[in-house]
């Protein structure tokens, strides 16, 4: 039972096919890239914060980055998590809805409905990969921020609580979306579309 369960989990992030060595390399590259991106974001924050403190003119995006995490930036992950949780509850407590499309459901053949469910499942898995990568980058940014605070960076220390809440929001969103995608995949299998 365990290998089948693991196969479904790797399927969620498109790592269910190909040589295990290649899949491992993909995971390692993604992890390193997310770590580097998080570290670079902290360095950009430090640079722009210094420019802001020196009263240099920054554009709105640069100002947002310079001020760091705050109430303005910590909500997207949490809102996504709530939306994904609502979708998960709806899936678990209701009937599976036909996939969205241009053709009315009544006019679609069974094979068209199944193809639509497969397409929707691929889209959900793609979104899961994106949200998972965002969560990994934000966690790496939080870790790099903690390291910067321990090195004595006072500017970053003022935004640490919001940084941690923001990163946690993306992690929760990724976990809830993974649960929804897994349940949706099981439902698509049950309906014979996979």
Image (tube, rainbow, N blue to C red):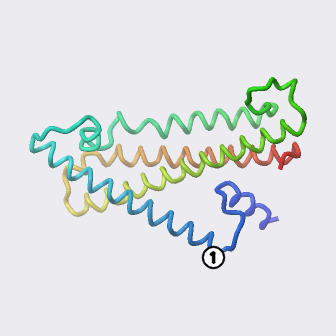
Q: Is residue 67 above or below residue 30?
A: above
- Residue 96's x, y, as percent? 80, 34
- Residue 71's x, y, as percent? 35, 34
**Which residue is at 87% across, 24% downward?**
106
Q: Residue furthest bottom?
A: 21
Callout 1: 10 Å neighbours few (<14), some, many (20+)?
few
Q: Is residue 45 left or right of residue 123?
A: left
**Which residue is at 38% across, 57% downward?**
38
Q: In this view, does 156 lie above or below 113?
A: below
- Residue 171's x, y, as percent? 51, 49
Nearest the camera: 157 or 136?
A: 136
- Residue 24's x, y, as percent? 60, 71
Question: According to the image, label 1 marks what residue?
Answer: 21
Q: In this view, does 32 lie to the left or right of 14?
A: left
Nearest the camera: 103 or 183?
A: 103
Q: Quadrant of residue 111?
A: top right
Which structural element holds mark 1?
helix
Q: In which quarter of the image is residue 58?
A: top left
Q: Which of the image's four quarters has the N terminus?
A: bottom right
Q: Is residue 103 above or below residue 169?
A: above
**Which residue is at 26% across, 34% downward?**
60
Q: Residue furthest left?
A: 54
Q: In this view, does 55 lie above or below 186?
A: above
**Which residue is at 31% across, 49% downward?**
160
Q: Quadrant of residue 35?
A: bottom left
Q: Is residue 126 left or right of residue 3?
A: left
- In this rendering, the count of numbered labels is 1
């Amino acid at each position: 039972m365990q290998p089948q369960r693991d196969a479904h989990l790797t399927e969620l992030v498109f790592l269910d096919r190909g040589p295990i060595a290649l899949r491992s390399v993909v995971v390692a590259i993604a992890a390193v890239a997310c770590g580097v991106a998080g570290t670079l974001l902290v360095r950009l924050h430090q640079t722009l914060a210094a420019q802001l403190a020196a009263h240099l003119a920054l554009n709105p995006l640069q100002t947002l980055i310079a001020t760091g995490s705050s109430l303005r930036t910590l909500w997207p992950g949490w809102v996504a998590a709530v939306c994904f949780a609502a979708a998960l509850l709806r899936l678990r407590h209701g009937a599976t809805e036909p996939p969205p499309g241009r053709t009315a459901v009544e006019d679609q053949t069974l094979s068209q409905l199944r193809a639509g469910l497969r397409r929707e499942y691929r889209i959900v898995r793609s979104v899961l990969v994106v949200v998972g990568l965002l969560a990994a980058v934000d966690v790496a940014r939080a870790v790099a921020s903690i390291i910067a605070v321990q090195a004595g960076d006072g500017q970053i220390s003022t935004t640490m609580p919001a940084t941690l809440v923001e990163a946690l929001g993306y992690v929760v969103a990724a976990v809830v979306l993974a649960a929804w995608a897994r349940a949706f995949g099981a439902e698509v299998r049950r309906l014979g579309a996979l």
